[in-house]
Amino acid sequence: MPVLPTISTFFIVISAIFVGIGWILITKNKPASHKKAMLAGAVSALIFFVIYVSRTVFVGNTSFGGPEEYKIYYTIFLIFHIILATTGAVFGIVTLTLAFKRKIKKHRKIGPITSVIWFFTAITGVAVYLLLYIIYDGGDTTSLIKAILGT
């Protein structure tokens, strides 16, 4: 089991758990606790991102090592995950910014959407991790573009 991908996946899961806790707390009208949980989720996501980018820069990304006939499905799934993760990150930054600027009406509108996107990002991220490192042996570790295109 590779250490950095395992650690980064752990932090994205922790991030989603904190977001879920934060969502529950705000429904129970506990805004101070909600804020703490959501900040913990954001910090966890940031730790994930730093580990992921560091690994990408210094080591590279691992290509799919499973059966060749599944590679196209994995690639489509990976592209979906990357789009979802990017969208979730942008929504997360906007949602946090709205909260910090005390634009609570807009924050309340976008927050649940952001949370759902983040939950799916975490789930698909774990699936990518499982497919790359647990279910199948990882392929070559190489640049991001080569890993996505399978070249």
Image: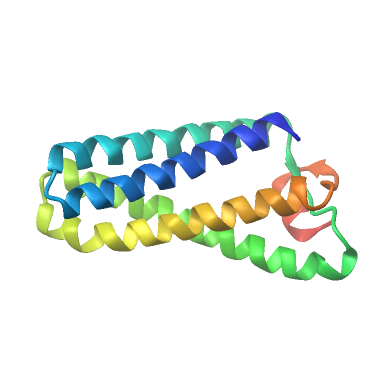
Q: Is residue 70 left or right of residue 92?
A: right
Residues 61 and 16: in front is: 16
Is any atom of residue 53 visible in this view?
no
Quarter of the image where one finds residue 4: top right
**At x 18% / y 50%, what residue is drawn?**
26
Seen in the picture, residue 142 relative to 116 is either above or below; the reply is above
**Where does the image place residue 21, in percent across and percent down from the top left?**
31, 46
Seen in the picture, residue 21 relative to 80 is either above or below; the reply is above
Q: Is residue 8 left or right of residue 102?
A: right
**At x 89% / y 65%, what residue is drawn?**
68
Residues 56 and 119: in front is: 119
Which quadrant holds the C terminus?
Answer: bottom right
Is any atom of residue 36 visible in this view?
yes
Seen in the picture, residue 109 relative to 96 is either above or below; the reply is below
**Where does the image place residue 69, in percent across and percent down from the top left?**
87, 70
Which quadrant holds the N terminus?
Answer: top right
**At x 42% / y 55%, what residue is drawn?**
118
**Where does the image place residue 55, in percent across and percent down from the top left?**
66, 32
Q: Is residue 114 left or right of residue 48?
A: left
**At x 32% / y 63%, what residue is drawn?**
113
